[in-house]
Amino acid sequence: MHINSFNLRTVLLLIMVLLMPAISLIAQKKDGKTIYPGAVWPDNRGNPIQAHGGGIIRLGSTYYWFGEYRAKDNPPGYRYVGCYSSKDLVNWTFLKRIQFSDPENLGAGWVLERPKVYYNEKTKKFVMYMHLDDRSYKFARVGVAVSDKVDGDYQFVKSFRPLGLESRDIGQFIDDDGSCYLIFESRPTRGFYIARLSDDYLDVAEQTCFISAPLEGGAIVQYNGLYYAIGSAMTGWNPNPNKFATAESLKGPWSEFTNIAPPEKNTYGSQSTMLIKVTGSKDTTVIFMGDQWKPSTQWDSRYLWMPVEIGDGKLRLPEPKPWKLNIKTGEVKIENN
Ligand code: DGJ
């Protein structure tokens, strides 16, 4: 068939028009400034970030994100914790896949979930907490591992039941004064505990509070002097309406728990893991970090991060949309808002 130059131009134009949406999406994904809740989130290598059930610490101006590293090509037998760094909470550099080999002989299907790392100024050690379990979730203990470097080879130290209680999902809270807490879910007492860490962070020193609400995925943030706790109902990997409560002191009393989003949305398919506060020069933003679990393809589980509407005792997770964060000013811009 003979294609003259007019036809060729028309065909090329048509192809470009058809490809425009895809081209602009790729460009958006590469602008390096936008967080896309629920989309594949590539690290600096172009690999999907593997830091599920994660926690974040900030050291100076660098953020470190730790979480379950569930890549499809993980060598079997071991469990892994991913460690990434970022200056802006958007672009993440892969630092290390930290390897653990069944430290408590829990057998096939052993569980390492929701790792959280604290930095201890006095001992200069990085202390990792993790939920350790056997395949039927009966062991119900925390594991502790330490490292001299944030992305070092963490050495397993011990496992224990905090305050002598069964502990499954764990959460991390570091208050503005630097004091560190472990949040853990206790099935027998139907609720979650907030426990202050000991001076060396290798243990819990005391019970700060017991929140009597059967929730897991516990997370806390302090905003304008009020504490906000969130958690999810216990429905395994399936999403449910996550809820929040407030208290003037970490010790309570805590208000009733209320939905953070319309209940039929099931937290937009996600489950809470942490609330991060970014205090900038102009604004303070609190980010809901959630996991969108994919139980049969866990390597493809996604992250739902959205800035929440927070203040005066209210907390609301808005409908997920792409958004930008200015890490210096703390300001947020949600697309189409
Ligand atoms: C819900 C927890 O939040 C997850 O971390 C994980 O333990 C699943 N349950 C397992 O079903």
Image: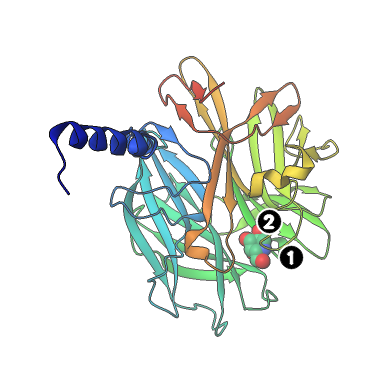
Point out the quarter of the image occupied by ligand 1: bottom right
Looking at the rendered structure, the kind of residue marked 2 is Phe
Q: Marks 2 and 1: in contact by CB < 8 Å?
A: yes
Considering only vertical position in the picture, is 75 above or below 283?
below
Q: Is residue 25 left or right of residue 255?
A: left
Query: As rendered, which of 307 and 164 lies closer to the eye?
Result: 307
Q: Which mark is residue 184?
A: 2
Q: Is residue 228 visible?
A: yes
Secondary structure at badge 1 equals loop
Query: Which residue is drawn at the image coordinates 72% and 47% (left, top)?
Result: 266
Secondary structure at badge 2 equals strand
In primary-sequence order, the first of circles 1 and 2 is: 1
Q: Which mark is residue 230?
A: none
Say few, some or many: other residues with alpha carbon within 10 Å of mark 2 (under 14 / 14 to 19 / 20 or more).
many
Query: Which residue is drawn at the image coordinates 70% and 35% (left, top)?
Result: 228
Does label 2 point to a residue whose CB lies under 8 Å from ligand 1?
no
Residue 268's x, y, as percent?
Answer: 66, 44
Quadrant location of the C terminus in the rendered image: top right
Q: Is residue 180 visible?
A: no
Residue 213's x, y, as percent?
Answer: 83, 50
Residue 325's x, y, as percent?
Answer: 45, 27
Query: Which residue is drawn at the image coordinates 57% and 61% (left, top)?
Result: 294
Disc 1/disc 2 C-alpha distance (Å): 9 Å
Residue 331's x, y, as percent?
Answer: 49, 20
Q: Which residue is mark 1?
A: 165
Looking at the rendered structure, the kind of residue marked 1 is Leu
Query: As rendered, which of 242 and 104 lies closer to the eye?
Result: 242
Query: As rendered, which of 291 and 106 lies closer to the eye?
Result: 291
